[in-house]
Image (tube, rainbow, N blue to C red):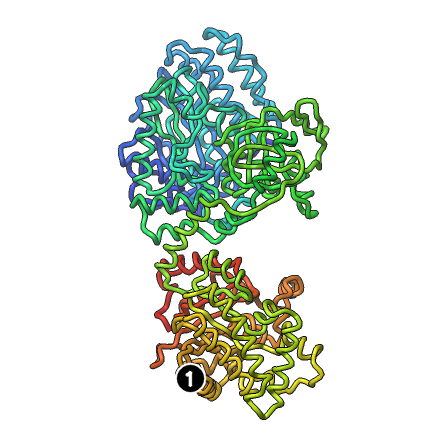
Amino acid sequence: MPRTFRIKGRHESMTSVTAAERFVYSFAEATHLDAAALGGKGAGLVQMTAAGFPVPPGFVISTQACRVSKDGAVPEALWREIVQAVHQLEERTGCGFGKGPRPLLVSVRSGAPVSMPGMMDTVLNLGMNEETTVALAKATGGRYRFAAETFARFARMFADIVLGAADESAADGASLDTVEDERSLRSAVRLVAEGVGASGTFPADPWAQLRQAVVAVFESWNSRRAIRYRDHHGIAHDLGTAVVVQQMVFGNLGSPSGTGVAFTRDPRDGSPKLFGEYLENGQGEDIVAGTHTPESLDDVGRRYPELIGQFHSLARSLEKTYRDVLDIEFTVQEGVLYLLQVRPGKRTAEAAIRIAGDLYKEGLVDRETVLQRVTADHLRQVLRPRFLVEAVEAARAGGARLAQGTGASPGQVSGRIVFDPDRAEQVASGGDPVVLMRLFTSPRDLHGMLAARGIVTARGGSTSHAAVVARALDKPCIVGCESLDIDAERRVVRVADRELPEGTLVSLDGSTGEVFEGTLSTGALSTDSVSHIGAILGLADDLSGCTVFNRVSTPDMARQAIAAGAHAIGTRIDETLAATAGFETLVDAVSAYKRGVTSADSNSNALAALEEVIAEALTDVMRAVYPKPFAARIANLSSGVAGEAVSDFTDVAPSPAIWLPLGSPQLLRAQIRGLVRAKETTGYPDNVILMVGGINTEAEAIALRAACREAGGAKLRLGVAARSPHGLLELPRIARHVDMAWIDYRSLCAAIYRYPDDLMLAQDAWKSYIADGFMPLDPANEVDEAIKLLMPTLTPDTHACEFGVTFYGWGVSEKVVRFFTERGFRNFGVEMNGLAATRLLLGRLASQEGAFGPPA
């Protein structure tokens, strides 16, 4: 259906607009405004203009204008500003809008404050009717065919974007092959206009075209695809879009004219080389839409070395100006280079990590900027499994490779072929992994792209819609697979003499551009990626000064944790015994626990045997950890393997005292002696920590310090963990007598709600309970008000106690971590798969004002 527009009369009021407000700024006069007002595209053009880069002149209609323009109407005050800006553009260019002899044609493009590639609308070549088309032909030296094609492009785009034509071929009613003079040109223009008119009233007045196009761009801010994109990326819905109106330059004027899109660094892997494509004798939409397959800049450079050399120089200058990798759109009109847009380039997670580190090494950004540009999601995406090399080689050798295209966004995934976005969304919602395979994608396909694990197109290049959006979503994407004959109606794809139906399993390598039949086995991360991640995390560690612990049970686990970046290692004595001493030895050790509790003789053979077992087990782990800080937590017999052994594998009834930290002093001292022996055997420095959990009072802390001295552990550091509300309240007093005071966050949350500890690990049940509204919040995402009220003020004491918090078993949000950093916590215990993300997050928080309170 065609869109309807309501133009307010000159005397109608617009209560949201006042005479004092200004909405329109030329590129040359908007240097005091930022992207929030000008949109990213407008801000970039303003900055390039001010810096003297070759930018066609134009003006920006601000985001505020979008916010006040409602119900398909352009406020009269805004329209007067637009008219005035067009007249100023006429004066600057020496061209006339809607008239000859040199007609002024303009592009009308959206420009949100936050980049949303391909999500909103653009109209090119606006200002054309029969008379201006003829004038354009004459002004370009009698290029009647060029003028006819340009009008057809404009009419087609106007019909689609502004009139909402259901039939995108509405402007194709005339053959342009026969256009050779003014008469045939006028005939072609009339036929095209009539074809568009079938879908809605096509205005011949360029001023009406401009007014309607501005409204259409504003309305595209709230299109279904734009809303879905903002929801997916967490972008606010009330920002609005700016509108950029700019003099057209023509890449479709024949050789060496053309259009291109380039990135100052490779957005796929971050390598420091110009990456882009160029379409000779074309306009920007041809290359972005993916309907044409362009050439690489390297190939074009061999034909036009001076032109591409000039672009290289401009790109380097722009990157130094912006201090980031850039996405640049440019047009060449008869050998003259123009820059049409610059914005921070969408990049994959792998590229984001490498580029941030490289820019830091090159001195373009500081470490705080680096850490704000790399996110925990980037790390998780790069650390995801990848195809095993041998699996890929076997697939190639076995003839499983179906097609070869251009790798546009890296990553390796497997899934079932689906040919339309609605089906992709439907299949994915059922739990099946999906690969969306299309001739080319458009903004209308976004919902299917969101649902898919990977994307394949038969046409298009590395800067097409599919490629740009896939990189923004960080999904593997292959474009230009021209050997794929996709029949969406029959739901099959033909490759050579084979026909594969929808649902066939395929595997994609978004780096090499290969499509394989079947699924491929996955494996570990590349050495280069590990190096780039390590450099970023090193910066994060330097800035935060925090220590991140990981809990292990075996020497192999310890080595893996250190290789993954753990600063310190912790273990629980009961878990280490279970993992290293074997089942029979564990039962003997638990029996020794029981005899130790019931025996009056602290020097009994049973306790001596227990001490020996602990010393041997901890020695092996400590040798793998040396010389990093090492914490050993006394056995927790109330849960886990040791607790079960107490109940199931001994004939001694458990004594209630065994569950208390100081309920069995003999058992406690045996564990301390075992840890001391392991320290002496390994020659460990004095950064070995005896950890005791479940402490509630200052008196317990005093007694634990005394027990350490009595058992020969005077050189051990003493650490305790609060797991209850009372322990949390007592923490400042407890801290006077220990070296480290920890909060066991998950156990504390369980105690606050009076739920079993293990329930907090039952993600399905727990999340369902929260989703049903039975809990006010998810404590993994936000700290409960009860904990905030109970949290005491922690300050350095005479023992210089350090404070820490453990998140074992949980992946917590930035908001939770920030709560503790603001209160001076500098030690964090996390799972192995959370090490990298936690180190990065701590660095990011350290670079943010107010996120790090003074060390407690």
Where residue 769 appears, x then y in whole percent? 65, 66
Q: Which residue is mark 1?
A: 733
Residue 856 to residue 311: above or below: below
When asked about the image quadrant of residue 105, the answer is: top left
- Residue toward you, 599 or 333: 599
Side of 347 where 33 appears, left or right: left
Where residue 326 appears, x then y in whole percent? 38, 38
Q: Hey, which residue is sitting farthest bottom in the picture?
A: 600
When asked about the image quadrant of residue 586, the answer is: bottom right
Residue 201 to residue 833: above or below: above
Label 1: state its secondary structure. helix
Residue 226 to residue 290: above or below: below
- Residue toward you, 186 or 83: 186
Picture quarter with the N terminus: top right
Where residue 820 appears, x then y in whole percent? 44, 68
- Residue toward you, 570 or 164: 570
Q: Is residue 46 visible?
A: yes
Q: For the residue marked with disc 1, what is the amino acid?
A: Arg
Q: Residue at x 40, y 77 (%)?
A: 739
Q: Residues within 10 Å of mark 1 (few under 14, many from 20)?
A: some
Q: Residue at x 63, y 34 (%)?
A: 395
When asked about the image quadrant of residue 387, the answer is: top right
Side of 783 where 800 appears, left or right: left
Residue 5 to residue 647: above or below: above
Picture quarter with the C terminus: bottom left
Where residue 506 appears, x then y in whole percent? 65, 36
Q: Is residue 236 visible?
A: no
What is the number of callouts on the image?
1
